[in-house]
Amino acid sequence: MPKFHVGGKVVDGVDLLKKKHWPWRLDVWPFAIIYAVWLAVVLPSLDFTDALIVLGGIATSHILVLLFTAWSVDFKCFVQYSKVDDIHQADSCKITPAKFCGSKEIVPLEFRKLTGNADDAEEIYFDFRKQRFIYSKEKKNFYKLPFPTKETFGYYLKNTGHGSESKVVAATEKWGHDLFTVFLLPPPCSFEYPQPTFQKLMKEQCMEPFFVFQVFCVGLWCLDEYWYYSLFTLFMLFMFESTMAKSRLKTLMELRRVRVDSQTIMVHRGGKWVKLQGTELLPGDVVSIGRSSGPTGEDKSVPADMLLLAGSAIVNEAILTGESTPQWKSFPLKTPDGGCVAVILRTGFETSQGKLMRTILFSTERVTANSWESGLFILFLVVFAVIAAGYGLEDPTRSRYKLILSCSLIITSVIPPELPMELSIAVNTSLIALARRGIFCTEPFRIPFAGKVDICCFDKTGTLTSDDMEFSGVVGSTESMELESDMKKVPVRTQEILASCHSLVFVDNKLVGDPLEKAALKGIDWTYKSDEKAMPKKGSGNPVQIVQRHHFASHLKRMAVVVRIEEKFFSFVKGAPETIQERLIDLPASYVDTYKKYTRQGSRVLALACKPLPDMTVSEARSLDRDMVESGLTFAGFAVFNCPIRSDSATVLSELKRSSHDLVMITGDQALTACHVAGQVHIVSRPALILSPSKNSDRYEWVSPDETEIIPYNVEEVEALAETHDLCVGGNCFDMLQRTSAVLQVVPYVKVFARVAPEQKELIMTTLKTVGRMTLMCGDGTNDVGALKQAHVGVALLNAVPPAQSGDSSEASKNENMRSKSKKPKPPSEDGKAMNANSEGPSKNKSLSKPESSTRTAGNRHLTAVEKQQQKLNKLLEEMNEEGDGRSAPIVKLGDASMASPFTAKHASVAPTTDIIRQGRSTLVTTLQMFKILGLNCLATAYVLSVMYLDGVKLGDVQATISGVFTAAFFLFISHARPLPTLSATRPHPNIFCWYVFLSLLGQFSLHLLFLISSVKEAENYMPEECIEPDSDFHPNLVNTVSYMVGLMLQVATFAVNYMGHPFNQSISENKPFKYALLGAVGFFVVITSDLFRDLNDWLKLVPLPTALRDKLLLWALLMYLGCYFWERFLRWTFPGKMPAWKKKQRVAVANLEKKKRE
């Protein structure tokens, strides 16, 4: 258990450590003693060669200990640190992050004297992932550095900034570390992501366990006569890793080309206004902010969260609420310079934007090729190799040096040098296929995860539906309940309300604001001028002058305006139907039925109302109390809006459902609308129930959309209820679920999440991961970033025009697509919350699509294939990025979903999810078959090199080369298998360790072994009696010839039998390169066995076979192949891929939570 239990969102626990002096570290003094013993005892008593072997073993152990300190934080603590209880004795901390927040780290513990305090006043703190945690002597625990965000409004209104130099110094000391300049070298005024150096990335690559093992193998080969080959291999290994590091560096540099250009801001310090850089702001500063733009006209922003005290502004709150509409913020006071007065609340990494950056940088560990399954599988093979090597040690007549060499050859044969290349080619093929479809990937080794996905979560607005609202018409303005879309039949007063009751505003001669309000204005065919006057485009209607606005407030769910029409004043109000209902003088009988009818159809309904005001002056009208303006109203009808579902959403989700995926919707929209849309796109197929607070008590109940079915909420009955109904939970119920610790019991069974905040989306993802689901999240907004990062497969949609689509949209929509995602309109005024520095789309996409593709230049026999792939990928990307006519990639802003997501799709459609899953399944089965093939090859190699090596069986150089060429060709061509165009209901096996793989390996290896032993024994019957020395040089004989031919046939059979075709990939007959390579290998086997070309056999150093032996070999090869084929097909039928059994894991997680609560 950690010494301090912080229990925060970032840090869970803290342990106090003291660094040991280097002579007393466990990686120093024990080995110093061992080396001394070797020098004093082992060296004099053993033969020099044996003593060197012992020394090599000690040195290897020492290097492994040092490496484990780099691989494991806990091991590093054990070796290099000692735990302490007194905080004043500690100099470091071991930080245990909260769940799903990355891995453990060791950070320095800092002590400092506080200026302006008593001599003994000191602060003890540590910095972890750009956040500061301070030790409290009273609470005897660490807490996060507080910011002035929870004071009263009166406190802020009296605030005049830091009044003296000493206060500025104190504030800088307290918060100055948290400025974005924490990353930077000069210039200090710009913000950037931390940029790793090539040396750091290279060190990371070279410290990977797989690379270390390969270097160790090369060291062993150096002891043999293959030292030229060994040094060449070592050089190529470093070339391979350095290319990989260079490619990663380029990707990171392109991806992180995001910064906020500093701007000069007026700050009130020391009683006067002074100009400071935006990066020098401190919490508590009072600033004057106005709309500023850079040289190219893009908006600049301030790296701070701030509270507006005086002035009027329009801000984009998308990063906070997911609401993409610019919001009005008004205050009665005005400032002399025309700017808005604001007080700084948070700076740097504590701002809302800073939190997003921490999410991108630190949220979850990156997925790499060397997954734990690969490591365990290789370990499993190493065990067999060690047993085989031990068999060879039984011969006491052989020299120890030769024994060590043969053992090293056996063990190192388990991991062929081309393994990382094979895995990379499989992933690279998928990268190219995805790039063709406008899908870019920053973490290529997440692609196999897509094949394991069993639950797909979708955002609604902008993902399943279009961002553009459509004005459908007005209902209720007459006695009819039918929708009226002909505006000529709609009362003029209703049109006047729609034309003037809005928050639209002109900025740089452009009308900006809520797309819904713009759609209404367009639908009634009115215009709105910059002088706040609305008038009809046609006809002789009266102009409507807006006198005073009472802006929309989320807690009131309504807005109002005071207008003047022909010298008469009116109050126009619009808002949520249930809110306006309470303020009407006369409620129509069909009011509730009408609005619920259209809400259940997925429409957005706003109630409209008005009342005439008495004669008054303009100044009196402006000073009217809001409550007076919004009461005693007359109903004027409902405005009905629709958000059209994207044309292919239903088709794509239907295919996902048929292919054994559960579907979930996570949206910020209203529950009735969400359930209707979910029904249209096949997420909801059974009767829906919505969890909501009971009207008559403080309890909760499940209510059907039409309110005909009401079931009291009981956490124990949720699982049973989910069997017969599709459940929907609103964001207002999450607090109750968290309070009653019912999240784990309810969330996994819910199909629709409505009215959820960004952090609740993240909670849903982490909950699904906790219960063992493989998650895919598809979203497009900044409010999806946390969920996209937490999902196993995050897919960000950039809402561009798909590459294959012709540019038939209007010029304006093209421009909008080019400028940014439609979900994220550029804020018309300053935006203290969100930063919108731009990084160029095309260069971004180049980086996203080839983080691994240019890394495959290791010097082995796949070099040409990889280079071809590289050129193919580069050419493809250049073509894609040079496309014009509105089809090039949108500019990606800081805060866009794509910044944190492993996959970024250049589409305004959810279709990329099926492409990613198809490629994921294809890559997964390809990887699985590669491991099976490697396993069988390695088991056979271990047997050949141990048991048969003692009998004098060896391979010649040319023979080994031909075998290697066939192996390389087979691996290359199976990785090029294309996925089938439709997703199958059958799921691939997600893990290497399962009964299917184990029994398949066992059965096939048994048949291979039987064929190998029988053939060699049969060959020995034809051999004259002669003594063959195990360590002698290679010379052709019948046993060598037969063992080589059998080995070649085993190779062909292994690839042919274990190839995974339908229902995921092309079959062998469809994958023509692989089919021809197999036929070529079989033909080659028949030719050399039949001895048709004597010169060829002489070159291969193969001796002629007796006719009887040749016929037996061909027959046994056919029987062996058929036996393996039918065994493999039987196992695939017996053990099909299934949906993961997550409910058992969920019950365990719930039980663990209960146990934790009791403790």
Image (tube, rainbow, N blue to C red):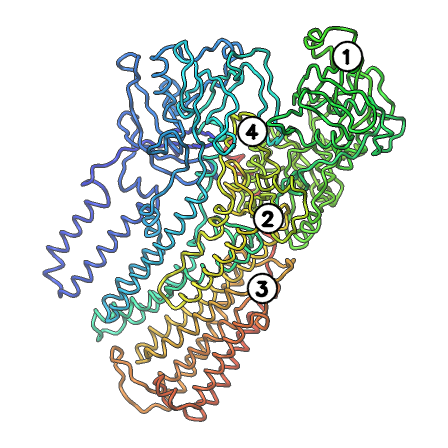
**Residue 1152, how many percent across, how many down?**
52, 38
What is the crowding at mark 2: few (fewer than 14 residues within 10 Å), some, or many (at least 20)? many
Q: Secondary structure at mark 3?
A: loop
The residue singled out by tag 2 in the image is: 887
1058 left or right of 393 in image: right
Q: Amino acid at mark 4?
A: Leu
Report the residue marked by disc 1.
Answer: 569
**Separation of marks 2 and 3 at Cα, in angstroms:** 31 Å
Left or right, 133 with reference to 929: left
Residue 532 placed where, x, y %? 69, 20
Q: The residue tagged with tag 4: helix, strand or loop? A: helix
Tag 3: amino acid: Asn
> Distance of mark 1 from mark 2, alpha carbons?
49 Å
Find residue 1065 and name its label: 3
Q: Looking at the figure, which quarter contains the N terminus?
A: top left
Q: Secondary structure at mark 1?
A: strand
Callout 2, which amino acid? Arg
Disc with the residue nearer the chain's start (3 vs 1): 1
Foreground tag (4 vs 2): 2
Taking 469 as reference, is 1122 above or below it? Answer: below
Q: CA distance from mark 4 to mark 2?
A: 30 Å
Going from the N terminus, do you reach mark 1 or mark 4 first? Answer: 4
In this rendering, the label closer to the viewer, 2 or 3: 2
Q: Earlier in the sequence, mark 4 or mark 2?
A: 4
Tag of residue 320: 4
* Front one among 189 and 239: 189
For disc 3, the neighbor class at 10 Å (few under 14, some 14 to 19, many from 20) is many
- Neighbor class of circle 1 (other Cα within 10 Å; few <14, some 14-19, many 20+) is many
> Mark 1 is on which residue type?
Phe
Q: Are marks 1 and 4 in contact (CB under 8 Å)?
A: no
Residue mark closest to the camera, 1 vs 4: 1
